[in-house]
Image: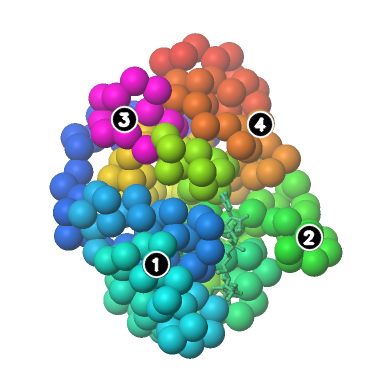
Amino acid sequence: MTDEDEKQADNLDSMSEPACSGMALGVIGAGRLGLAVARLALGAGMTVRVAGSGAPVRTRQVVAMFAPGAETVAAEDLVDVGTVVLAMPLSAIDDLDPGMLEGSVVIDAMNYWPETDGMRPEFDDPTRPTSTLVAARLAGAQVVKALNHVAFRDLEAGAKPVGSPYRIGIGIAGSGEALERVAVVVRCLGFDPVPVGSLAESGVLEPRGPVFGAAVPAEQLRARIDAAQGRIASGDG
Ligand SMILES: NC(=O)c1ccc[n+]([C@@H]2O[C@H](COP(=O)([O-])OP(=O)(O)OC[C@H]3O[C@@H](n4cnc5c(N)ncnc54)[C@H](OP(=O)(O)O)[C@@H]3O)[C@@H](O)[C@H]2O)c1
């Protein structure tokens, strides 16, 4: 992390608890992760729009059953939501209209799985985290990596109100106001945001990184990331 990133991380740590009720969140991908995020957001009082693959009529039933209260929409109807979670297979990024999310904060929760995505060497380059490719594809959107390193079941089981013991830390990578907004969303969903640096440093959150699969409190997550990033883990961020 740069000095500026560290300063922003300190600011995020000292943020007061956000007012989540009524905040809008879009989700693309009505599968395990997307619906889990939708349920957590609804539980926080947020208004949620979910877009699946294809026409809304195909997705409506699954959303009504597994995330009742969320609105099913076409992906194009997420243009004005402001904050949109990508919870679809990474390779489906090829199908998204690159201009559609212009001006939005995009939370990239996707991981590369060759079994699902096919063999895609460009998604498998440790020097270029996949979120940097997502950001390049969605030029005009502000992309932040988050919500990708914890399994959906652990997210649902571990979401807790602020101050609860063993509140899970969620690594977030990005910069500027977009990172701040995503930190708020992560808090609303029931987790503690742990900034890890810019999008270029989001590899620590990816499947081959040190915290993938880790549903642990923020200080433990921070220590593992610090160790991986070559700093001595002091435990105080
Ligand atoms: N599962 C987890 O615990 C977990 C945790 C963290 C991150 N992730 C990441 O989240 C992403 C989704 O994983 P998942 O486990 O939720 O997968 P999943 O259960 O298979 O769901 C993926 C959903 O994405 C939809 N989809 C496919 N192409 C789409 C498109 N072009 N536009 C909109 N929706 C599209 C699929 O719809 P159709 O069925 O109609 O094709 C499906 O409903 C992956 O990148 C994964 O690595 C998963």
Label 1 lies in ligand 1 vicinity (Cβ under 8 Å)? no
Can you tell which mark lies on residue 115? 2
| Alpha-carbon span between mark 2 and mark 3 | 37 Å
Residue depicted at 32% across the width and 65% down the height: 68
**Which of 234/185 is in front?**
185
**Circle 1 crowding by C-alpha within 10 Å: few under 14, some 14–19, many from 20:** few
Amino acid under disc 2: Glu
Q: Secondary structure at mark 2?
A: helix
Can you tell which mark lies on residue 65? 1
Tags 3 and 1 touching, CB below 8 Å:
no
Residue depicted at 33% across the width and 39% down the height: 190
Which circle's residue, 4 or 3, is located before the other in the chain?
Answer: 3
Amino acid under disc 4: Pro
Q: Is residue 112 magenta?
A: no
Q: Is residue 46 above or below residue 139?
A: above
Q: Which residue is mark 4?
A: 210
Can you tell which mark lies on residue 19? none
Tags 4 and 2 touching, CB below 8 Å:
no
Residue depicted at 53% across the width and 57% down the height: 32
Magenta span dominant secondary structure: loop
Which circle's residue, 3 or 1, is located before the other in the chain?
Answer: 3
| Alpha-carbon span between mark 4 and mark 3 | 22 Å
What range is drawn magenta here? 159-169
Can you tell which mark lies on residue 13? 3
Q: Is residue 162 magenta?
A: yes
| Alpha-carbon span between mark 4 and mark 2 | 21 Å
Amino acid under disc 3: Asp
Is residue 178 in view? no
Amino acid under disc 1: Met
